[in-house]
Image (cartoon, grey):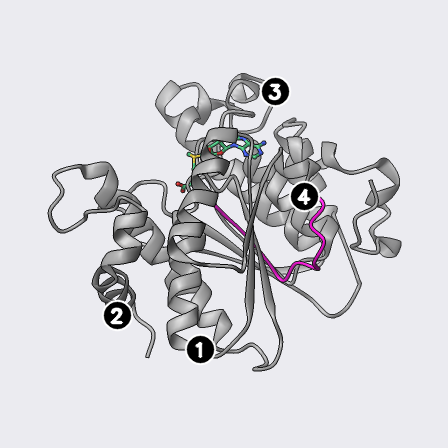
Amino acid sequence: MVSKKSISDELKTSQELMKALSLNVDQSDDGREIKKFNEVVGFCDQVIRIIETYPQNKEIVFLDCSCGKSYLSFALNYIISKRFTKETFFYGVDTNRILVETCYRIRDNLGFKNMQFICARVIDVFPEKPIDMIIALHACDTATDETIAKGIKLGAKYIIVVPCCENQIRNRLKSGHPLVDLTDFGLLRYRFADILTEALRAQFLMGAGYYVKLIEMISPKFTPKNLMIMARKKKSKKYNMNSYKKLDEMFNTDFVLKRYFHDHDFVWNNYSGVENS
Ligand SMILES: C[S@@+](CC[C@H](N)C(=O)[O-])C[C@H]1O[C@@H](n2cnc3c(N)ncnc32)[C@H](O)[C@@H]1O
């Protein structure tokens, strides 16, 4: 039975894993370690619930975008291998070469052969294997949008992101939209920009043919950045960007996500969902 508590206990009992990741959560006074551990547990919880519904004999391929030290992928790899007999493969991508080298060292220490790390921008990565699940935990700023765009282009069955900072549209909210009386106040503009950004991302995904839900993956007492966007690809290929466009135009956001696509991709009726750039 999946629960955050059981995942947390299972990870903590693997001293080898926790040591390799330098996560000393029970002895540590370092709030960042404990915060990261709880974020990873919350993310794993949602992914494991999906994995339980996967066909037994199919390899599940993950692409962890802006993976950093890949806490999430190492933890998922460990938990899935303990709980299921399913084959998995993990790609991690990050622009920081030192972190990519660290990931390879951790992988070799743990003997996880089913992992490969790539030093690149998310939008520029072209994995060899077809991707089932794109995941991103706190990919900085527009790296979350690169992740969503990459997932759509690769036709990933699941796109699951927990965004980090949202900087792109905050300054665009100062004038020229219907809620200007609300966003006159700096603090409210800041908070509203976060909400609008997540709404644009969610509407874009829906327009591109995904079912979308937004949840809090862990309690806000662990981190305020706890909003998870979970998108599952629909079987039907009926796409409709109208809601996204309406929101984008209402607030004149010129949102970054659409820049990763060609104009002709927005004739969504014939968008194939396959990488084409
Ligand atoms: C806040 S850290 C999160 C790392 C990791 N996901 C975690 O939860 O520990 C963000 C990471 O994104 C990487 N990054 C930023 N922009 C990127 C991009 N466009 N493509 C790939 N990686 C990127 C940074 O190098 C950094 O490691």
Q: Which residue is mark 4?
A: 149
Q: Earlier in the sequence, mark 1 or mark 3?
A: 1
* Position above or below: 11 against 119: below
Report how far apart the C-alphas of labels 3 and 4 lie in the structure: 28 Å
Q: CA distance from mark 3 to mark 2?
A: 49 Å
> Badge 1 local density, few (<14 within 10 Å), some, or many (20+)?
few
* Element carrying mark 2: helix
| Mark positioned earlier in the residue sequence (3 or 2) | 2
Residue at position x 21%, y 64% in the image: 13
Q: Name the image quarter holding the N terminus.
A: bottom left
Q: Residue at x 61, y 29 (%)?
A: 251
Residue tagged by mark 2? 6
Q: Separation of disc 1 and disc 3 at Cα? A: 53 Å
Q: Does the numbered disc 3 mark a residue whose Cβ is under 8 Å from ligand 1?
A: no
Label 1 sits on a secondary structure element that is: loop
Asked where in the image residue 55 lies, by quadrant, the reply is: bottom right
| 3D distance between C-alphas at marks 4 and 2 | 33 Å
Identify the residue under disc 1: 84
- Mark 2 touching mark 1, by CB under 8 A? no
Residue at which label 3 appears: 176
Q: Which amino acid, by three-letter code, is at mark 1?
A: Phe
Give the camera-side residue of 36 and 166.
Answer: 36
Q: CA distance from mark 2 to mark 1?
A: 15 Å
Which residue is most to the bottom? 56
